[in-house]
Amino acid sequence: MLDAPRSQPTLPLFDAFPKLASCVSWMSLGHWPTPVQEAKRFASEFGLRQFFIKREDLSHPHGAGNKVRGLEFLLADAQLRGARTIVTASAVGSHHVCKTAWHARQLGIDTVAIVVPQPKAAYVARNLLLGASVGTRYVPANYVTAIPKVIRELLRRNEHKQRPYWIAPGGTTPLSCLGHVNAAFELRRQIDAGQLPIPDYLYVAMGSLGTAAGLAVGCALAGLPTQIVGVVVSHRWYATKGRWLRLARRVHKQMRRADATVPECGIDRARFHIVGSALGRGYALVSEGATRLAERMRAAEGIELDGTYTAKAAHGMMQFIEANKLQDRVHLLWHTFHAIGPRPDLAPHCAQLPPVLKAYIE
Ligand SMILES: Cc1ncc(COP(=O)(O)O)c(C=O)c1O
């Protein structure tokens, strides 16, 4: 974090902790607050008393989804440091890479993305093409473990004449997690305004864990007794309660270092749950149960869920509710996905991709 004094705090989080606003860099990219929608038809179909959806998929008209909140901190920090290139890493069809590159481009910053293989899907092709359309340079790596070597090689060649700004896979760092801490304060305001009751349970997909970690800290600091259920969508060995809460504690510690008025908050393990049973055969592999649930959500509410993240989050939610007989409680699903529709205009950008990535477009 750098000292970036600003006179106008513009986030609910900064209203709660004004000193924090003067210590962290932040810029507005998204459309806030994201709406909370009551999903009455879906709830009645599944016998739920009250069910709401936090529409993070509406956080931006072109580049929405959960990653925008973190990018408001990361790109502001990159800009403050004078970065002209961002280097990041993820799976080939990563929303994180695509959204980072899109928003960075609006600021005149280039993106280099080191990408590892993943199953083919329509959204993978769309994300790749959108990334290519904003000039992203994709560098394929065969394995996650090869990423550090590729980064060293990029730095050694020093093509960018200055040290690039590194963003961790999935865009998850203690700094970016502040975006999701703020989201909990935003939710608190929506509750106080009567848009929804305090949810008993909040469900969120767990990829690189940043969204879940930020929400854990934010709910605790905003005084929300809501229990958070993380649904594993990446890897069971990675998305553990231990790693989730360690990251949450790091986020909280960073906040207290920046602003001593941030109170202690007990991150009580009992309020956090992990559901691993909705992952199916693995990351980005669609599961039948999640697909069926996504169809019912589309029919009941006209809301699109994706097979990699949000349909599995919803499936995990239903498994958790049924296993624990929680139908009479208040449930909130964190809708993190932003669908990019078919864009025939992007097809020519396939030519800019490295040959090995073109296979994802066919
Ligand atoms: C659409 C979508 N939902 C959820 C997630 C998971 O968020 P996180 O990586 O913060 O755990 C991701 C991560 O890439 C995502 O792209």
Image (cartoon, rainbow, N blue to C red):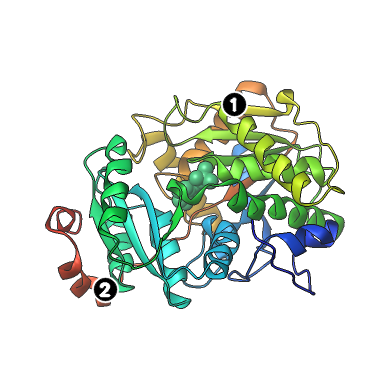
Using residue 346 as the reference point, say whether residue 291 is left or right of it: right
Residue 32 horizontal/vertical position (percent):
67, 67
Dot label at residue 93: none
Dot label at residue 346: 2
Q: Kindly identify the amino acid type of the residue bearing the numbered disc 2.
A: Leu
Residue 35 horizontal/vertical position (percent):
67, 62
Depth check: give the residue in front, 11 or 309.
11
The residue tagged 1 is 241
Q: Is residue 57 above or below residue 202?
A: below
Which residue lies at the image location 28% right of the left edge and 54% below the top edge?
156
Depth check: give the residue in front, 12 or 320.
12
Q: Neighbour class for label 1 at 10 Å: few (<14), some, many (≥20)?
A: some
Residue 246 horizontal/vertical position (percent):
62, 31
Which residue lies at the image location 79% right of the left edge and 40% below the top edge?
220
- Please say whether residue 196 is visible from this viewpoint: yes
Residue 130 horizontal/vertical position (percent):
33, 68
